[in-house]
Amino acid sequence: MHVCAPLAVRLHHWVFLRMSLLLRLLCLVLTSPRRSRLHVLDTCVTPFRVWLNDLDVLFHMNNGRYLTILDLARVDLMMRSGLWKHLKAQRWYPVVTLETIRFHRSLELGNRYNVETRVIGWDQKHIFIEQGFVRGETQVALAVVRARFLKRSGGVVTTAELIGLAGIEQPSPVLPEWVARWSEAEGGMAFPSSSSSDREKETVVEQ
């Protein structure tokens, strides 16, 4: 009984968390078509609000929740730009390979905020996305995400293939120097026991 009770609490928390994220995703899917259409290189502004289950023990939005919200904001950009339907047709999907975030302020229960998402450049392997949390006129946090796309049939989508699918004809903007160094250094966190190609294969299997 003493073992089952904590397990039940954790299970209830996991179900509640998953349902809230699915609800947010459903709201996003339903509202995205009614908002302005975007080019994939435009800045996408996605509104959110801090819910009770977003909070940590100090009653601020949990640090981990920021990363989940970033996922939803990127989905919003892909849907409003029309890229999402093309990706589904090709059976391609995005994966994050590296991300970093800096916190300037905190978000509290009931706060309304926007996530501003924009593509800041790409190289032969990756797409780089900047995402900022903004409450009113105040920037709360700023993140940079490095992503690439995989094929459900197996293999990696080249940047050239992705850019072609998105209808982008211009070259990549120049990446900020620190972003280029950060990417080259893999965020300073290497995996000495496996190569990057091995990790990509593992990611495909996990999906």
Image: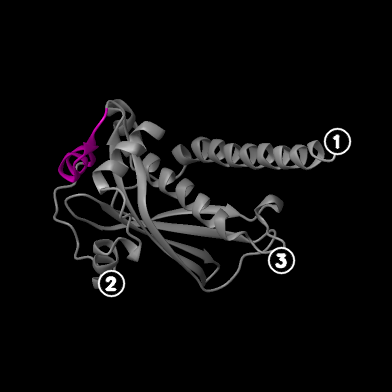
Q: Which one is in front in this view, the residue at disc 1 or the one at disc 3?
A: 1
* Quarter of image, res 8: top right
> Residue drawn at (22%, 41%), measured in percent from left and top?
162
Quarter containing the N terminus: top right
Give the CA distance from mark 1 to mark 3: 30 Å
Q: With 177 as the anchor, is 20 left or right in this view?
A: right
> Disc 3 marks which residue?
58
Closer to the camera, 164 or 33? 164
Closer to the camera, 184 or 191? 191
Q: Which mark is residue 178?
A: 2
Category of crowding for the residue at label 3, using alpha-carbon neighbours closer than 10 angstroms: few (below 14), some (14–19), many (at least 20): few
Q: Can residue 207 be seen in this view?
A: no
Category of crowding for the residue at label 2, using alpha-carbon neighbours closer than 10 angstroms: few (below 14), some (14–19), many (at least 20): few
Upstream in sequence: badge 1 or badge 3: 1
Q: Give the range drawn in magenta.
A: 154-166
Which color scheme is applied? one colour
Q: Which amino acid does label 3 sit on?
A: Leu
Give the CA distance from mark 3 to mark 2: 32 Å
Q: Residue 1 carries which label?
A: 1
Q: Which amino acid does label 1 sit on?
A: Met
Residue 136 at x, y percent in the picture: 55, 68
